[in-house]
Image: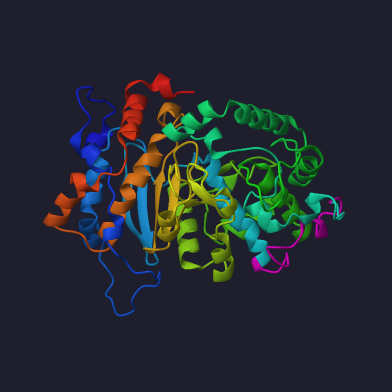
């Protein structure tokens, strides 16, 4: 397999690799429901492998990165798996921002079991030090605002972390915002209360409350940072009376059977410190897809657009829900009607781990990767996002029954191209000249 080689032909971009940059998912309608048809006979493993052969061929031809795995699942469970190089679905990796989605749903679990009354419970009814003065905008902050990153605490933008072409362009165009966010992040990291080793989430929450300023009106401003989930952790500890790692076990790791996953430290950063495997994260995605762990009402609330006020702004990935984006990848026009109708959700990580749930077509998929040592190279960490976006319409076509020799030709046809020439240039440049993408 080409995927097992790390060499790269400098003469041209392989045709197989280019053929995966495809769209056309709208042409392949699939059922809205996530429930399997009771009358249908179970699909055999051999049949599943044959059905997904075109996708496997495309992944085997992908030479831009080698250490990654891909899985696709429906309500029936995993339908497809691909493992490249020495990377498997059991490889334990740091996830960076991929932590945000499970963390947010974990804290939503305290509403599901009644520990916290509602998603719109005000924080000042749980944390005794939190102001109740109506003149102080912090008094209006709710759990929902913390989970949707709309509490107003601190600066931050998705472009600060990602290693994609669009993220690098955002940083170059916004030096002042970049400087403010980096200064705020440094202050947070230097706080003893929030230190992963000697801090605690209860003390960290109070430190954020006392030291981090609001950048806007709670509920009407969005910032991508660690403050919101650290405050949610403080709320969870106070409301439940449980130590933080008992909370992670009770509301996330045990319910979703994430038996090999954990958060690092005595005071975990819930926006970025989850260690997990592709298998574990796949079980989390399946649990959300099928509404098996949390009530449907809470999951549906988690997938609502919490940032409609962003309107035409390009947020790189789309608008925001509970710890994840309503997927609208790199759209300069902002969150478009087409993105809204697509009903897809994603939580990209800075190291290349990309999970997606597609409600319209009833499936989940993930590109599991960690492009940092020892499992990868940071210069390539932006590439898996493009692989996930490019592979997605192929998944939809295959799930809708577009298989066989004719379909295989369609999967390689130029009519299905999706990524721009600028995207391809960026991907190839990172591969051929890693130093260009290393910082």
* Residue 24 percent coordinates (x, y): 27, 53
Q: Residue at x 79, y 37 (%)?
A: 211
Q: Position of residue 232 (x, y in %)?
A: 70, 52
Magenta stretch: give its range: 112-130
Quarter of image, res 329: top left
Answer yes or no: is residue 241 visible. Answer: no
Return the x and y of residue 303 as percentages of the image width and height: 53, 60
> What residue is rendered at 30% in x and 56% in y?
25
Task: Find residue 146 and report its horizontal and vertical position in percent.
Answer: 68, 52
Q: Residue at x 37, y 59 (%)?
A: 73
Question: In the picture, residue 421 is in which quadrant?
Answer: top left
Up-down relation of residue 74 to residue 57 (above or below): below
The one nearer the camera, 264 or 232, is 232
Residue displayed at 60% across by 42% down: 224
Q: Which residue is situated farthest in the left direction here?
A: 405
Left or right position of 433 against 263: left
Q: Main secondary structure of the magenta part?
A: loop
Residue 323 is a magenta residue: no
């Amino acid at each position: 397999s080409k995927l097992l080689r790390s060499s790269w032909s400098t003469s041209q971009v392989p045709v197989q690799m280019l053929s995966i940059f495809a769209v056309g998912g709208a042409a392949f309608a699939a059922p809205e429901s996530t429930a399997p048809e009771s009358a249908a006979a179970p699909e055999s493993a051999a049949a599943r492998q044959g059905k997904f052969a075109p996708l496997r061929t495309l992944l085997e031809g992908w030479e831009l990165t080698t250490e990654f795995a891909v899985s696709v699942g429906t309500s029936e469970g995993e339908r497809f798996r691909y493992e490249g190089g020495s990377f498997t679905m059991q490889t334990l990796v740091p996830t960076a921002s991929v932590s945000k989605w499970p963390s947010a749903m974990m804290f939503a679990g305290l509403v599901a079991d009644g520990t916290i009354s509602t998603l719109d419970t005000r924080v000042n009814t749980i944390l005794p030090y939190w102001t109740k003065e109506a003149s102080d905008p912090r008094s209006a902050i709710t759990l929902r605002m913390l989970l949707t990153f709309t509490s107003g605490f601190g600066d931050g933008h998705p472009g600060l972390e990602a290693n994609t072409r669009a993220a690098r362009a955002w940083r170059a165009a916004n030096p002042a915002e970049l400087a403010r966010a980096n200064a705020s992040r440094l202050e947070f990291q230097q706080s003893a209360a929030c230190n992963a080793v000697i801090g605690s989430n209860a003390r960290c929450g109070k430190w954020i409350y006392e030291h981090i300023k609001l950048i806007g009106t709670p509920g009407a401003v969005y910032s991508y940072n660690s403050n919101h989930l650290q405050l949610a952790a403080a709320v969870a500890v106070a409301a439940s009376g449980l130590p933080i790692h008992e909370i992670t076990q009770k509301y996330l790791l045990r319910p979703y059977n994430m038996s090999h996953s954990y958060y690092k430290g005595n005071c975990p950063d819930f926006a970025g410190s989850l260690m997990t495997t592709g298998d574990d994260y796949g079980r989390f995605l399946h649990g959300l897809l099928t509404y098996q762990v949390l009530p449907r009402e809470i999951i549906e609330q988690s997938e609502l657009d919490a940032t409609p006020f962003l309107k035409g702004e390009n947020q790189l990935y789309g608008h925001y829900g509970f710890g994840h984006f309503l997927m609208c990848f790199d759209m300069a026009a902002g969150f478009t009607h087409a993105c809204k109708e697509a009903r897809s959700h994603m939580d990209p990580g800075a190291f290349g781990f990309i999970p997606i749930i597609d409600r319209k077509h009833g499936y989940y998929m993930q590109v599991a990767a960690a492009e940092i040592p020892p499992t990868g190279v940071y210069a390539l960490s932006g590439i898996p996002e493009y692989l996930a976006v490019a592979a997605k319409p192929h998944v939809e076509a295959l799930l809708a029954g577009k298989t066989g020799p004719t379909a295989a030709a369609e999967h390689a046809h130029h009519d299905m191209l999706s990524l721009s020439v600028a995207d391809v240039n960026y991907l190839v440049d990172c591969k051929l000249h890693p130093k260009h993408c290393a910082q």
